[in-house]
Image: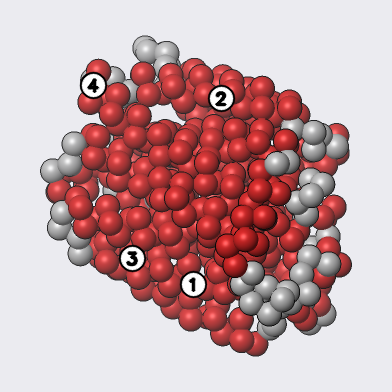
Amino acid sequence: MDRSGLRYGLLGLGTLAYTSLMLVWFSVAAYLAEIVAELGLSSTQAGLLTGAIPLTYVPVALFSGVVTDRIGPYRAIGIGLVLFGAAQVGRAGAESFAVLLGLTVVVGVGGTTITFGLPKLVAELFPTDASGKPSSVYMLGSFAGTAAAFSLGRGVVGPMLGGWRPLFVAIGVGVLAYAALWWLVVYLAPLSALRGPAGAGADDHDGTASPDGGVRGVAGLRRDVGRVFRTPAMRWLVVVGVVYLLVVHGLQNWLATVLRARGVAPTLAATVTSAFVAAEAVGTLTMPAVSDRIGRRGGVIAVCGAGCALGTATLLVPGVPFAIPVVGALVVGVGVGGISPLVRMVPPELDGIGPALTGTAVGLVFAVGELGGFLGPFLVGALFDATGSYAPGLAVVGLSCLVAVVAGWRIPA
């Protein structure tokens, strides 16, 4: 196989790593009603549980992004697979909210390495002007994992195995087996042999150490972070990241539960949630291509934000035919699906960032952005406890989308 084929083969393996992460991530949301009932959780605790992984990104993401730039995407992804695979096995035996929450935090720590390792991998393997397709590919893997959590996990495998606990064990063991395969690939296919033209200039090492032979220390880390944050476009991209993560986690974690509260059967609610994820995949496939064609990624982000606002509004209208909120949810899915790869594609194209600081830049977006990722599901649950309605939380989600519209137009990429 030639180098190009090997690059796409490695991209495919990375895509499966993202699939594994999202299957683990949303396995709790898929069985949220059953977990709440078995452990006696309040809606606020359920919101904390579903928002724990995004909240973990806040203190960990920036550090994880910087470390990914230092040790390289190979090792970062491998470490992450082991962490969240083992944590998923542990979650199967959790008998209390505190234990389940703690292990979910470990899942979040492992997840950061996938979130930042894959953009770094793409930046090193492919030229900047050809990064759109690879970025869409690995994002499709994330959507496949999320959809599988609701459709296969909740709808087929979980009932067949006897509930959420044996399902969690099966998923965790599968992830650990895949981690062993990934580490074998790390050994057999050095990144230096596959690095593309853009990545070759990013570092003069094999993605395993800094150019001077070791981690450059606190001063170097501060310099990289400061360089990224001083880029004006990055500040607007951080705002987009906050809104994107608030919307995707707020709706993805609660959509099935919200629909069930409106009288929808559990299987149908899970099917609609899977359709929401499929709509995200559509946005991921189409929006980067549109931004390539018009040469304006920020403008496409703004359009996606407007679609999210409109779609969320349909979920707030009571007494309407079931098809209307379903279509609205799909519109939101397309919107957030389009934003997802774009926030990862913009940093390598910015002056002063490039492939060398992609991990740090994307880490900054998620370090701040996951405040929104936590607040989305938490507010939906907490406001339901306070008001007895999901409408206030959904209204917050919808209004935040308008902020992404403004921020998107300010991004010059």
Residue 94 picture quarter: bottom left
Which residue in the structure is indicated by mark 3? Answer: 87
Residue 15 visible at all: no
Sequence-wise, the earlier of marks 4 and 2 is 4
Q: CA distance from mark 4 to mark 2?
A: 23 Å
Q: Nearer the viewer, residue 8 or 86?
A: 86
The amino acid pointed to by label 3 is: Ala
From the top left corner, tell me how far across and down residue 63 is, in percent: 53, 58
Q: Nearer the viewer, mark 2 or mark 1?
A: 1
Q: CA distance from mark 1 to mark 4?
A: 40 Å
The amino acid pointed to by label 2 is: Cys
Q: Does residue 396 sit above or below 48 in this rendering? A: above
Label 3's element?
A: helix
Label 2's element?
A: helix
Work out which residue is located at the far bottom of the displayed protein and give it: 188
Which residue in the structure is indicated by mark 2? Answer: 401
Sequence-wise, the earlier of marks 2 and 1 is 1
Q: Does residue 103 sit above or below 259 in this rendering? A: below
Residue 386 — which label?
Answer: 4
Sequence-wise, the earlier of marks 3 and 1 is 1
